[in-house]
Amino acid sequence: MKVLGIKRKGYFSPNHVGNDAAIFDMVSQELLLKGGHLEVCDEEAFMAREVVEQELIITMGRTKSLVKRLQSLEDQGKIVLNSGYGIENCFRKNMTLKLLAEGVPYPKSLVVDTTTDISDIVAAFGGPGVWIKRGDFHAIHKEDVTFATSVEEAQSILNEYALRGITEAVLSEHLVGDLLKFYAVRGTNFFHWFYPYDHNHHKYTNYESINGETLHYPFNIEDLKRSADQAASVLGVHIYGGDAIVGSDGTFHIIDLNDWPSFAPCRNEASRAIAQFLFDYFTANDAKEETYLHEE
C-alpha cells in the first residue's frame, strides 16, 4: 500500500497550526504501523510534482489550485481522502446550498453578492443580529465569520468583504442555544462531541459572549451523529468535524462542517480511528482493482 500524504499549509490553520500538524503526523505513524508505505509532502511540494506515482492519497490541503489538481487526479482513477470534490463542497457557499437542499438541519441562510444592499434581508432575519460569513472559502481570518447586531454594521462588514475581493457572502440567522463541537469519521463508530466553552477550546473568545452561557440542554446524541454523517455524505467527505447549536427543546442545527479538522481534544483516539478507516478503505479499493484487472 503506497500512499502519498499532503500536509495542510499553515495559512489554512488559523490558531491551529500545531494541532493540524499533530493529527496528520499521528495518522501517518498509525498507517506506517499497519504496514503502509507513506511519503509525506507539503502543499507546495505536491504542486511542484509533474507526476504523482501513488494511487492512494491522503490530504489536509485546502489551496484552491491544489484542490483542483486533486480532482483531476481523482478523475484519472486515483483515490483521494478527503476527496478534492468534498473539500470544495466544504467552502461556505457550497456547503450552505447543499445542506439546505438536502434537508440537513441548518440555520436559515441566504447567499448574497457582497455589493448587495442587505437592509431588508437583515431586517427579515429578525433576532438580535445576523451572522455574515465569506462565501468563497473557509474562515481564514477572524472577520471571515462575523456577528452583526445592526443593519448598518452588517452592511459595513459586507462592504469590507467586497474590498477584500470576496464576491459572495452567506447570511445566517442567529440561533439561541448551546454551542457544541464534534469530530467524526463517516461510516464508523467514532464520534466525539463536547461543549467548547466548558473546555476553553474555541478560536475566538468573543463568540462566547455572543452565543451565551452553555446550559447543557438535553438532546439525542445518536440523532446528532446521524445528521452529522448525513451532512458529511452530502458534502462528500469522510474525515470531518463541525459545530452545532442545541436549542432548549433539544432540537439542533449544524452550523458548520469542515474537512479533516484538528481533532485536538481527542487526538489519540481519532488518529487510530482515521488510520483504521483509511487502511480499510484503501485495502477494499485495492482488492476491487485487482479483481477488475484479473477479469480483464
Image (tube, grey):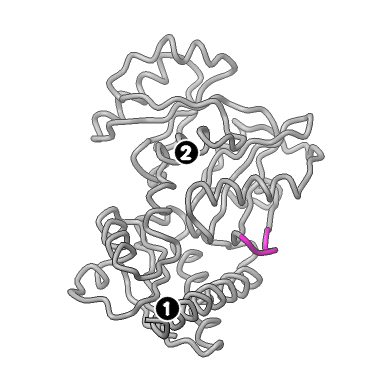
Foreground disc of the pair 1, 2: 1
* Above-or-below relation of 149 to 189: above
* Quarter location, residue 294: bottom left
What residue sits 27% from the left and 56% below the top?
68
**First in sequence: mark 1 or mark 2?**
2
Residue 51: % across, % down:
21, 76
* Above-or-below relation of 162 to 34: above
What residue sits 38% from the left and 82% below the top?
293
What residue sits 41% from the left and 40% below the top?
94
CA gap, disc 1 and disc 2: 33 Å
What residue sits 61% from the left and 51% below the top?
229
Residue 207: % across, % down:
56, 37
Residue 62: % across, % down:
35, 57
Is 188 inside the magenta-drawn segment? yes
Relative placement, left or right, of 251 versus 14 is: right
Check disc 2 and report the residue beneath it. 98
Check disc 1 and report the residue beneath it. 292
How crowded is the residue under tag 1: few (<14 C-alpha within 10 Å), some, or many (20+)? few
Residue 55: % across, % down:
36, 77
Give the extent of the magenta segment. Answer: 187-191
Is 284 inside the magenta-drawn segment? no
Looking at this view, is 159 or 82 the one in front? 82
Looking at this view, is 77 or 225 the one in front? 77
Identify residue type, mark 2: Lys
